[in-house]
Image (tube, grey):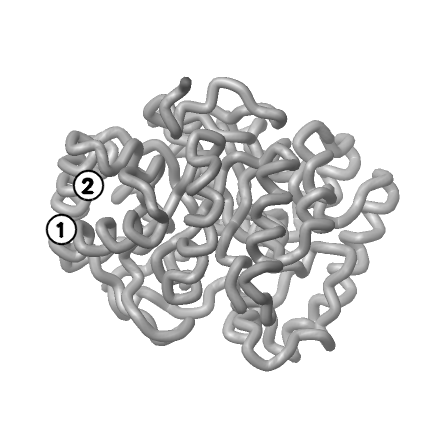
Amino acid sequence: MARSGDLVSAPLPLASLGDGLRVTALGYGAMSLTDVYGAVDDDTAYRTLIDAVDAGIRFIDTANVYGGGRSERTIARLLRERRDDVVIATKFGIAGGAIGRREVRGDPAYMREQLSESLQRLGTDHVDLYYVHRIDTRVPIEDTVGAMADEVRAGRIRHIGLSEPTAEELTRAHATHPIAAVQTEWSVISRDVERSVVPTAASLGIGFVPYAPLSRGWLCDGFDESAIAPGDARPGFPRFAPDMLAANRALRAEFLDLARAQGVTGSQLALSWLYARADALGIAVAPIPGSRYSAHVREWLPAVNEHPDAETLDALDGFAARIHGARNARDWTSLRGEPDDTRKSVR
């Protein structure tokens, strides 16, 4: 039997990230197992997770802060029966509070504490990919990653990842211990990572795990801004402010027209664009869209094998420059002391 975290076969194509980590080319973002985009009960969340795995998605991404541990506890139900079927990624580094009111911690003691708590919630003795969710500039990245490397040697972590690093931080971290994956928001309308982080990751042989590849549903056919209910986290992101949603309606309609012309849905075009763009930049990707609904998960699957035509790619190339509003919910530079657009979102 293959060791968990070493996928040798899967219903979907595999992506080779860094440090020998192989995952399905499409993952599932398990923040959606919580109420972040609207209320979902535990049984419905679990059913969606099971359906995602049964459909061939064997790369599950979560974090300790998603639903205050609820996402990890839901995933534990899956792991009790199917631990060897999936690669599990979780994270530490964002401490407490709601979106917009969180702090960053990267000290080794906090990492070890949070890893132990995540493993307990997940009901497993190791996590396949462990991310620094946000990088604490008060702690040298070498100290944070060095402590994680100790956990690799101890067997509690298989691979190390960074979420929203700068290119310089990524380079320093990789010199301390091989980094398997970078996770940052990346989509047809959020492309700041292409300036330096993606080229650096590609040059170091590190894979990329784009989060919010569907821009939190905005790029999907069924997005309805009037249906965003109280408790939904999206209004905390600048692009989901009422004036920004109004300003971007025409661009969204244009995007969906391009999808229809290709004979695909908006989510399929968004994902297939990302695969095509990553291929052009020479980097392996495994995007992690999320949804509470199994039907949405099934809708994503064909995108793994689709490729937009050259005319459509050309038409989409300028969308990121035309979007109104930042992708970020909070300016982390106040904590970090340096300007960089690649680490501000508090997902």
User: Looking at the rendering, which quadrant does residue 71 occupy?
Assistant: bottom left
Amino acid type, residue under disc 2 in the picture: Met
Query: Residue 140 location, x and y as percent?
Result: 14, 49
Q: Is residue 114 visible from the viewing direction of this image?
A: yes
Q: Residue at 40% of width from left, 19% of height from top? A: 2
Q: Horizontal placement of 235 versus 154: left or right?
A: right
Quadrant placement of the C terminus: bottom left
- Looking at the rendered structure, the secondary structure element under dot 1 is helix
In the image as oriented, which residue stretches furthest toward the bottom? 230
Name the foreground residue: 208 vs 70.
70
Q: CA distance from mark 1 to mark 2?
A: 8 Å
The correct choice, above or below, for 283 with respect to 134 in the image is above
The numbered mark at residue 35 is none
Q: Residues within 10 Å of mark 1 (few under 14, many from 20)?
A: some
Q: Quadrant of residue 310?
A: top right
Residue, disc 2 = 148
